[in-house]
């Protein structure tokens, strides 16, 4: 699963990105539906997902798929995890910050990942053991070792709003030391930005495997660490993630525990 497979995934991501871009100026005419409370999707999500699966099935007919819109199909050691439009809410509001996210899992381990930002024409990619790249140039995670001066990113997942009070308490504690906190609306891009040093750390609960699978590999291959709120590796199972370099990640994770936010998410 090296360069040939990566080329296929990049092609699939770009085709999905083309579909998304064609609809950017036509948002008012789209069919939008609410999958769950405050969790929306559109026909563009489905069109992009169909295109990705078509491209991947052509190259990997025996692989399984876990896609946000169509769910789980097939059984295999290898599973493609797909978010055809991560940041749908941004897209629907005309905010130019969203992406395509595609990852390949070997059992439950990410071994290939691509995050494509069609608005900026940025391809973040990683293959396990081969490092992470942005538009084919090597990227490395930031080396900030403490919360002082750190730029953090978080999210408020619609599935976790009942825990928002504790999350805000945690943010208040972090802001006593950190420079600032961002909420961008795309978990996959949040992880990509941590991988390339644009942000120092990212944390969120209520994320799904398709939100983070590609980004987890990007962070790891850029020299960083991903864990859940307790420091474990059950991110796909419990929907919690902290991503950063080792030292800063530990500081963020400990703050999440000490403020009681981790308990609220158990």
Image (spheres, rainbow, N blue to C red):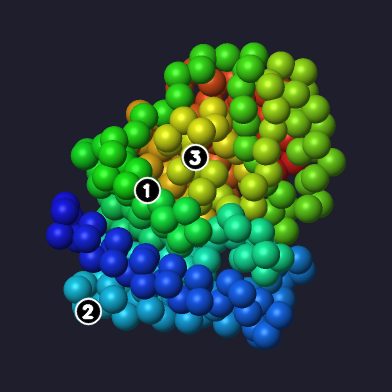
| Mark with earlier residue (3, 1) | 1
Q: Secondary structure at mark 3?
A: helix
Label 3 crowding class (10 Å Cα cut-off): few <14, some 14-19, many 20+?
many
Q: Which mark is residue 58?
A: 2
Is mark 3 in CB contact (under 8 Å) with mark 1?
Answer: no
Q: Position of residue 264 (x, y in %)?
A: 75, 41
Q: Which mark is residue 124?
A: 1
- Give me the residue at 51% from left, 48% from top: 189
Relative to 116, say whether 189 is above or below: above
The nearer-to-camera label among 2 and 3 is 3
Relative to 124, say whether 131 is above or below: above
Q: CA distance from mark 2 to mark 3?
A: 31 Å
Q: Secondary structure at mark 2?
A: helix
> Relative to residue 35, is residue 100 drawn left or right?
left
Is mark 2 in CB contact (under 8 Å) with mark 3?
Answer: no
The nearer-to-camera label among 1 and 2 is 1
Residue closest to the eye, 63 or 215: 215
- Give me the residue at 49% from left, 39% from top: 193
| Mark with earlier residue (2, 3) | 2
Residue assigned mark 3: 193
Q: Quadrant of residue 138?
A: top left
Q: Quadrant of residue 61?
A: bottom left
- Give me the residue at 82% from left, 32% from top: 169
Residue 177 in sight here = yes
Q: Position of residue 241 (x, y in %)?
A: 55, 41
Q: Secondary structure at mark 1?
A: strand
């Amino acid at each position: 699963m090296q360069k040939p497979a990566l080329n296929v995934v990049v092609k699939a991501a770009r085709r999905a990105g083309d579909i998304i871009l064609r609809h950017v100026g036509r948002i008012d005419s789209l069919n939008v539906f609410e999958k769950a409370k405050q969790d929306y999707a559109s026909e563009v999500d489905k069109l992009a997902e169909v295109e990705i699966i078509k491209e991947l099935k052509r190259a990997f007919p025996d692989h399984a798929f876990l896609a946000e819109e169509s769910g789980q199909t097939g059984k295999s050691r290898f599973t493609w995890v797909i978010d055809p439009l991560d940041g749908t809410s941004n897209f629907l509001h005309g905010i130019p910050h969203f992406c395509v996210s595609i990852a390949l899992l070997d059992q439950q381990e990410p071994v290939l990942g691509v995050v494509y930002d069609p608005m900026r024409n940025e391809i973040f990619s990683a293959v396990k053991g081969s490092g992470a790249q942005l538009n084919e140039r090597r990227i490395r995670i930031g080396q900030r070792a403490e919360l002082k001066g750190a730029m953090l990113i978080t999210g408020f997942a619609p599935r976790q709003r009942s825990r928002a009070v504790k999350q805000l308490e945690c943010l208040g504690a972090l802001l006593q030391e950190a420079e600032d906190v961002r909420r961008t609306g795309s978990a996959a891009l949040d992880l990509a930005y941590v991988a390339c040093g644009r942000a120092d750390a990212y944390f969120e609960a209520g994320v799904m495997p398709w939100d983070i699978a590609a980004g987890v590999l990007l962070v790891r291959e850029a020299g960083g660490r991903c864990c859940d709120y307790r420091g474990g590796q059950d991110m796909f199972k419990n929907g919690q993630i902290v991503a950063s370099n080792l030292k800063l990640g530990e500081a963020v994770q400990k703050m999440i525990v000490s403020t009681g936010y981790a308990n609220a998410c158990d």
